[in-house]
Amino acid sequence: MRPASTPRSPVTARVFVQRFSSTPRGARLARHLAVQRLHAWGVPYGSAVSDTAALLVAELTANAVTHGRVPGRDIEVLLRLDAYTLRIDVSDSRGECRPAGPEGTAVAAPDAEGGRGLLLVDALADRWGVLDRVPVGKTVRAELDLRGR
């Protein structure tokens, strides 16, 4: 006789990885494909998680093509969804051009035309950070906790 088992959350993780051209068009396509993939995984268009993920992918890919662009090199977007967390990784080839991370996010001057993107990431993501990318480059990771959303 087998003992009664305790119900558990599924451990399956869904993963999407795609490279995009390091251009504004590539960043736009990344955002569109990210919300499309989330919808296919059961995160409906227009939901809070989908809209937040779209903003995070848009900002991180825009930063990658603006500040991390190396001619001839693509950016890479990874989405990982499990029962608890959505992780968004955006990687580029410029490791020397690194944002400070959550503890060093600077506030832009009121009249500045840019410099607010990582403040948006900081406000929307439950966690975010900058990681080294092997063999070259960096990855900016943002995570959304799905519990309570």
Image (cartoon, rainbow, N blue to C red):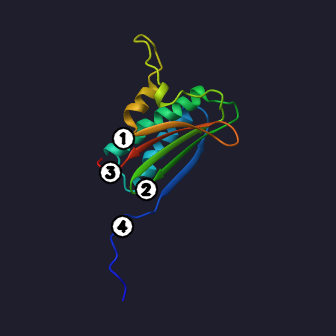
Residue at image x 43%, y 39%?
127
Mark 4 is on which residue type? Arg
Which callout, 4 or 1, points to the residue nearer the camera?
4
User: Which one is nearer the viewer's eye here, 101 or 72?
Assistant: 101
The residue type indicated by label 2 comes to Asp
- Where is mark 4, residue-wise? 8
Lower position in the chain sequence, tag 4 or tag 1: 4
Distance in Å between CA atoms under marks 4 and 1:
28 Å
Q: Label 3: which residue?
A: 147
Q: Secondary structure at mark 3?
A: loop
Q: Earlier in the sequence, mark 2 or mark 4?
A: 4
| Callout 1 amino acid | Asp
Q: Nearer the viewer, mark 3 or mark 1?
A: 3
Give the residue pinned by disc 1: 51
Q: Is residue 46 visible in this depiction of the protein? A: no
Residue that appears at 61% across and 30% down: 68
Q: Is residue 88 visible?
A: yes
Q: Which residue is mark 2?
A: 82
Left or right for 10, reference 139: left
Give the x, y percent position of residue 47: 31, 46
**From the image, which quarter does the N terminus lie in?**
bottom left
